[in-house]
Image (cartoon, helix red, strand yellow):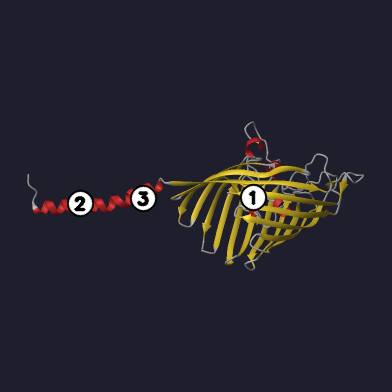
Amino acid sequence: MKPTPARSVALSALVMVLSVTSAPLAAQASADTTLTVRFGVFVDAYYAYDSGRPVTFDRSFTTQPARANEFNVNLAHIEASLAGDQLRGRLALQAGTSVHSNYTGEPTNGSVSGPALARHLQEAYVGYQVSPALWVDAGIFFSNAGAEGWVSADNLTYTRSLVADFSPYYSTGVRATWQATPRLTARLDVINGWQNISETNDDKAVGTRLDFTVRDGVTLSHYAYAGNEVGGRFRLFTGASVVAAVSGRVRLLVQVDVGQQERVAGGATDAWTGGVAAARWQLSRRTALVARGEWYNDPAEVIITTGAGVPSFRARGGSLGLDVSPRAGFAWRTEARLLSTAAAVFPDRGEASGLSRSNLVLVSALTLRH
């Protein structure tokens, strides 16, 4: 039957509507299912000389470098980062002496938990963009605490400060990251506990972080943690940091941490404090000088156990280093670090007691990131 003019107009209008609406839907469906994957690798190999020449070659009160007087790998990881419309994720598998050192406290509770597998998962999370300014991630991810990262290439100094080594590097749970304004980012974590993948109790902990960019190159941060530790003892931890590019050649970092924990559930509390100040001077396009001063007081050994019969850890220290980067992604980092304590806690073959009040480490490392 021959269509009437009215029917022809109606059919034409319907075709136009379908073509207009179907194109965005098809494009949206295509975008929703498209993921890009970026692969990466990082290797950090080092040699460290420890003045105490520990018998077991294990160095105390540090995760980096964790072995003395031998060539070894501090950290090596491979990663796959995923990004797409409203989706993101990262899987990074790792090994190295810093990994063994940092994950020794990972709890074993039951037959399918513990450090054997957990230490090889640097990060393993998946995220969803709830709104343009809000992401929610779940899995294992870097913690909310501090200004120094787990990967040495991300830090001003090669060795990590005491406040970095004795606060969480990783967390397990759910986090929400909100870009409140172009300059303010807020983060809320609900996690298993203080740097643990496997649980130690029935409680969950909460972490927060605020990062405020005062101006380009200057960021103020505040972070906190609250949760019950083993035995139901409540732990509260907070800290603040400033990371600033003073000029094109100078970068500064200042951080102060304070924490307290109940001696027994519902009882009195013990406190610890720590701080660090570091600077990096770019001497030339390829070389930089780095320096640091630090302190840490844990009189009741809430966080740091000396194992030497000394009921207190009080340390001061400093470091000086030289970084040479002949090309992007590759660096030769050399550093000298001296720590001194109020009581003899460092293993030392040269002392009659086997312990010393000071420790000097000289370390040189080659790092590659691609």
**Three-letter amino acid code at the position of disc 1:** Val
Quick one: label 2, few (<14), some, or many (20+) residues within 10 Å? few
Instruction: Give how far across and how far down residue 237 sits, in percent.
Output: 68, 54
Quick one: label 1, few (<14), some, or many (20+) residues within 10 Å? some
**Mark linked to residue 151:** 1
- The residue lying furthest to the top in this view is 111
Quadrant where the N terminus lies?
top left
Alpha carbon separation for disc pair 1 and 3:
37 Å
Q: Name above or below for residue 104 compared with residue 163.
A: above
Of the residues tagged 3 and 2, which is closer to the observer?
3
Q: Residue at x 59, y 59 (%)?
A: 210
Q: Which residue is mark 3?
A: 28
Q: Which residue is mark 2?
A: 14
From the viewer's perspective, is 250 left or right of 314?
left
Mark positioned earlier in the residue sequence (1 or 2): 2
Of the residues tagged 1 and 2, which is closer to the observer?
1
